[in-house]
Amino acid sequence: MNLNYYIFFIMMFLSIFMFLFLYSEVFLTLMSLEFIMLSLFMFFSLFMMMSMNYILILYYLVFVVCESVLGLTLLIMMIRNFGNDNMYMLNLIMW
């Protein structure tokens, strides 16, 4: 059981590393954010299953789905407006 905790922490730290150092494209940052959410979901699900509190897992999943849909919507809008998802090519000061 303790091995699962270590695996989830390793997953979370690797995804945070990806988020911090691979920020050149929006899609990579969205993927790393989803990986963070997935590792947190696995970590919290172990605690919630032990305490038989299933409704908090459902709330967390709804939050994660809404966050991912919002991120993909913004990505699609940026690609339609600017033609690519490369963060270096965007001039964010003009917004």
Image (spheres, rainbow, N blue to C red):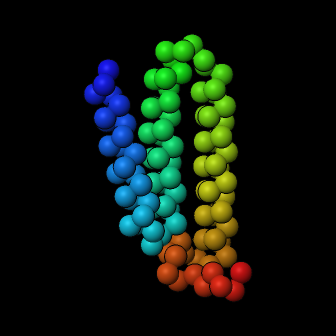
Relative height, residue 7 to residue 81 (above, below): above
Q: Nearer the viewer, residue 78 or 57?
A: 57
Residue 75 location (% of width, % of height): 60, 64
Q: Nearer the viewer, residue 85 or 36?
A: 36
Residue 3 location (% of width, % of height): 28, 27
Q: Nearer the viewer, residue 47 or 36?
A: 47
Residue drawn at (52%, 66%), measured in percent from left and top? 26
Q: Quadrant of the N terminus?
A: top left
Q: Quadrant of residue 80?
A: bottom right
Q: Nearer the viewer, residue 91 or 78?
A: 91
Number of numbered discs overlaid on the protein picture: 0
Residue drawn at (37%, 36%), measured in percent from left and top? 8
In the rendered image, the residue lying farthest to the right is 95
Residue 33 location (% of width, % of height): 50, 52
Drawn side of residue 85 relative to residue 67, left or right? left
Drawn side of residue 21 relative to residue 73, left or right? left
Relative height, residue 36 to residue 93 (above, below): above
Q: Quadrant of the C terminus?
A: bottom right
In the rendered image, the residue lying farthest to the left is 3
Residue drawn at (57%, 13%), measured in percent from left and top? 52
Relative height, residue 59 to residue 22 (above, below): above
Relative height, residue 76 to residue 53 (above, below): below
Residue 12 location (% of width, % of height): 40, 45
Residue drawn at (32%, 43%), measured in percent from left and top? 10
